[in-house]
Amino acid sequence: MSTHLTTPLRTAAGYYKRAWRIALRARHPRWSEQVLKRNLAWLWASRTQAEEAACEALVAAGSLMLPVVDLGIMPQRSVGRAWWPSKRRQEASPGSVGGGGGGGGGGGGDDDDDDDGGICTGGGTAGETAFVPAVAPIPATRINTTRFAFWPQIGDIHAPIPDIGEGVESVLEAGTLLPDSDTTEGTWRGVATVGEGAAGHVYLFCKIDADNRIIDRMAIKDSKPMHRLNWVNPTYWRDRLPKELAIQQRLAAQGIEGVTPFRGHRLNMTDRRYRQYFDFCDYRSLDDVLVRYYHLHGSPGAQIRRRQRRNNPSMPVPETIPEPFIWHVCQSLVNTLFLLRDGNNQPLPNNEAWKPILHLDICLTRNLRRAGPRCGWETTAPALCLHPHKH
């Protein structure tokens, strides 16, 4: 946390206490001034050597910025009148805890001299001014102030994700927003919505070259905001990521062929949303296969044509699902489920053991087909990919 001052302060304790005063007032608005000063004195006496050096650098530079403080040590209730410094500063002793850094309320005092402290840094006697080396000010950095160890570390965790509430066109026009997507050979363009469910929406993006030809396709899945209680529930997280993203990353590292290829993700901690990038499966799902053959055999029109063939045997018979394709689907599904259970013998982060992944929603729409011949089958047989949506 950092903010601006109108005039520079004269002591390291002044900078440190002013930064903490703002944080304490926001957290404990009912505290009296006396209680506030007592807690400020305790925080300053419990400072680390690095914090003191950072504040002294601000004094030397005459900075108008306040230092970054560790909100993880903020007192949840006021310290007592007979307070003792925290163990954060291990080199401090009872006789020297409050003396450094510019007369900043050490010991048991309640003084808060963040505005009118002297320029003595504690190294000299009264009337003397200790030499302060010219140290470059330490820039403010963002820190993780949450208490949730399962949340991600500081990084690009507030990346904006388009909202479907603003219209499909706004989502498609926003682009892929994937930093690692290669744009040297073409441009990504949003085409259409290809799926929608309780968890989110799926969009098709195509990469167009200079001759306006499609050279690549990508499916982008935007999740809906996760419930607040689930967002702070560790059972919904793994590897400091939402569990769905962590599972996709682990499967991608294993190189499992029967799972939809994963290209990356985008996370927005503020809106409790994330975006996933996958290869587009050209041949859609097994549900589309059954719908096609239903119209050939089970629809009312197909039943009429079946009765007509009884009187006219020369009428063509509609095609049926090839038996090799049925066995191909079964084999691909079983092999993929075994890999979800046992992994593919690829190392995991921190040399962890592979944990079985249980798919909780295997259905026709989760089994996608993509182009590419496979050894042992007809050259027109598509590769079957299981999309690990729920686990």
Image (cartoon, helix red, strand yellow):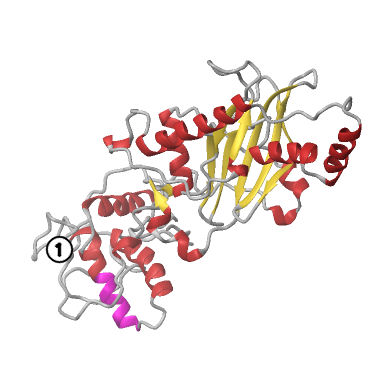
Is 325 located above or below residue 231 in the figure?
above
Q: What residue appears at the point 53 percent right and 16 percent down from the top-left corner?
A: 376
What are the residue bounds of the magenta stretch? Answer: 32-41
Across and down, in percent, residue 193 comes to: 73, 44
The image quadrant of residue 303 is top right
* 184 or 17: nearer the viewer: 184
Is 204 located above or below residue 382 in the figure?
below
Q: Is residue 333 visible?
A: yes
Across and down, in percent, residue 162 comes to: 66, 49
* 312 or 221: nearer the viewer: 312
Does 112 sit left or right of 298 as displayed?
A: left
The image quadrant of residue 276 is top right
* 282 or 63: nearer the viewer: 282
Q: Is residue 191 visible?
A: no
Give the SS element for disc 1. Answer: loop
Mark 1, residue position = 97
Label 1 packing within 10 angstroms: few (<14), some (14-19), many (20+): many
Q: Quadrant of the N terminus?
A: bottom left
Does 272 sit left or right of 45 as displayed?
A: right
Across and down, in percent, residue 273 comes to: 56, 53
Residue 36 painted magenta: yes
Residue 234 painted magenta: no
